[in-house]
């Protein structure tokens, strides 16, 4: 029996190690930071100051232009009505308050399902490729109203809560699940202007900037701190990017890890500055087959997305609007929400 003792001991040790790794990766939770309600809004203040200075410079330039009266000199040149130079206007340091009603992204004839002075949301349900799809057209006066939140207000590994629970805790009007950062050890985590994880991964990174734009970047091109310095308000490391500059960037054979070809999906995209799309599809049911990544990209592009990005899907895919989960989250063959690490929300 002695000659088998080493093999048995090794087998038991390997089994114990595998069990520990599985528990640590998928089950055991670790809180790295609690009370994550802090936000870094300094980039919005910088943006406002820059906009104000630009406007003031424009006003000053206009004021300093010579005023033409049309009265002619004898030699045919124009002269002003009086010879006293006009005083230049004083620089304005306050930006007039805007509302979604008078922003470039607002259409007074648009039939919003939710509207306040900064947010306009229109919900639409589609049935396409044998799948129910729920789309939210979101128009904001500032990206500051596109926020994120962690489950249980805690940044950590395998710390989860249902999307609806986290949305309710943060008074969200609209919310979808995020990138489930807590199931991975790498990939930048930048939320509400704060860096929580600065370890890069090979996954596409979606950056949402304070100026209301979106961009998909390579994580190895920048440090997390550099991205925040460049005005990144939110960043997600799941992917892949679906649409860039209006062009689909996934192929019909692309897929996420070991996921099935047709799945419930969650995606976020941008049509123009501060004009966003939140999209969730059902799947894995007799009523809804689900979408491939390429089909999801096609759908996002059909809605006008110039940029679009795939967030965590499958059983995580959930859309919450005005206090109700409006899609059919599918987890382990049943219609029910499952816990996720984080949400993206409007509020």
Image (cartoon, grey):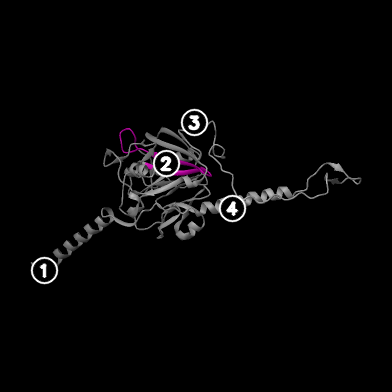
Q: Secondary structure at mark 3?
A: loop
Q: Secondary structure at mark 4?
A: helix
Instruction: Give yes or no for contact between labels 3 and 4 (Cβ–Cβ under 8 Å).
Output: no
Q: Earlier in the sequence, mark 1 or mark 4?
A: 1
Q: Which residues are magenta?
A: 265-289
Q: Nearer the viewer, residue 19 or 295?
A: 19
Give the distance between the C-alpha atoms of the residues marked 2 and 4, in whole angstroms.
Answer: 37 Å
Give the distance between the C-alpha atoms of the residues marked 1 and 2, in whole angstroms.
Answer: 57 Å
Q: Earlier in the sequence, mark 2 or mark 4?
A: 4
Q: Is residue 117 left or right of residue 29?
A: right
Q: Earlier in the sequence, mark 2 or mark 3?
A: 3
Q: Position of residue 17 (x, y in %)?
A: 22, 61
Q: Secondary structure at mark 2?
A: helix
Q: Earlier in the sequence, mark 3 or mark 4?
A: 4
Q: Residue at x 24, y 55 (%)?
A: 23
Which quarter of the image is occupied by the N terminus? Answer: bottom left
Q: Residue under label 3, please give it.
A: 111
Q: Which mark is residue 50?
A: 4
Q: Residue at x 72, y 50 (%)?
A: 88
Q: Position of residue 110 (x, y in %)?
A: 52, 32
Q: Is residue 321 left or right of residue 11?
A: right
Q: Residue under label 1, please give it.
A: 3
Give the distance between the C-alpha atoms of the residues marked 3 and 1, in whole angstroms.
Answer: 78 Å
Q: Residues within 10 Å of mark 2 (few under 14, many from 20)?
A: many
Please, is residue 223 above or below residue 283 in the view?
below
Q: Is residue 137 magenta?
A: no
Q: Residue under label 2, please give it.
A: 296
Q: Secondary structure at mark 1?
A: helix
Q: Nearer the viewer, mark 1 or mark 2?
A: 2
Q: Residues within 10 Å of mark 1 (few under 14, many from 20)?
A: few
Give the distance between the C-alpha atoms of the residues marked 3 and 4, in whole angstroms.
Answer: 33 Å
């Amino acid at each position: 029996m002695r000659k088998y003792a080493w093999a048995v001991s090794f087998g038991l040790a390997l089994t114990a190690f595998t069990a520990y790794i599985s528990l640590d990766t998928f089950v055991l939770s670790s809180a790295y930071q609690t009370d994550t309600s802090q936000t870094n809004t300094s980039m919005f203040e910088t943006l406002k100051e820059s906009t104000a200075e630009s406007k003031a410079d424009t006003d000053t330039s206009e004021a300093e232009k010579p005023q033409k009266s049309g009265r002619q000199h004898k030699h045919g040149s124009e002269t002003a009505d009086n010879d006293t130079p006009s005083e230049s206007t004083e620089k304005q340091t306050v930006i007039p308050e805007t509302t979604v009603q008078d922003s470039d992204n607002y259409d007074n004839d648009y039939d919003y399902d939710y509207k306040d002075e900064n947010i306009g949301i229109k919900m639409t349900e589609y049935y396409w490729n044998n799948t129910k799809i729920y789309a939210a057209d979101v128009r904001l006066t500032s990206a500051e109203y596109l926020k994120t939140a962690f489950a249980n207000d805690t940044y950590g590994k395998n710390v989860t809560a249902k999307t609806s629970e986290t949305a309710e805790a943060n008074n969200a009007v609209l919310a979808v699940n995020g990138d489930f950062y807590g199931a991975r050890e790498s990939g930048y985590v930048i939320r509400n202007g704060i860096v929580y994880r600065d370890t890069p991964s090979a996954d596409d990174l979606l950056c949402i900037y304070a100026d209301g734009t979106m961009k998909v970047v390579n994580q190895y091109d920048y440090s997390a701190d550099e991205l925040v310095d460049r005005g990144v308000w939110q960043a997600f490391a799941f992917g892949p990017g679906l649409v860039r500059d209006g062009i689909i960037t996934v192929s019909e054979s692309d897929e996420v890890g070991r996921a099935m070809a047709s799945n419930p999906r969650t995606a976020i995209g941008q049509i123009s500055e501060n004009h966003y799309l939140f999209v969730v599809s059902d799947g894995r049911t007799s009523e809804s087959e689900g979408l491939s990544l390429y089909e999801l990209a096609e759908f996002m592009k059909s809605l006008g997305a110039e940029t679009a990005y795939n967030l965590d899907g499958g059983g995580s895919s959930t859309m919450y609007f005005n206090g109700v989960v409006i899609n059919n989250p599918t987890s382990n063959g049943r219609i029910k929400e499952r816990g996720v690490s984080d949400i993206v929300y409007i509020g």
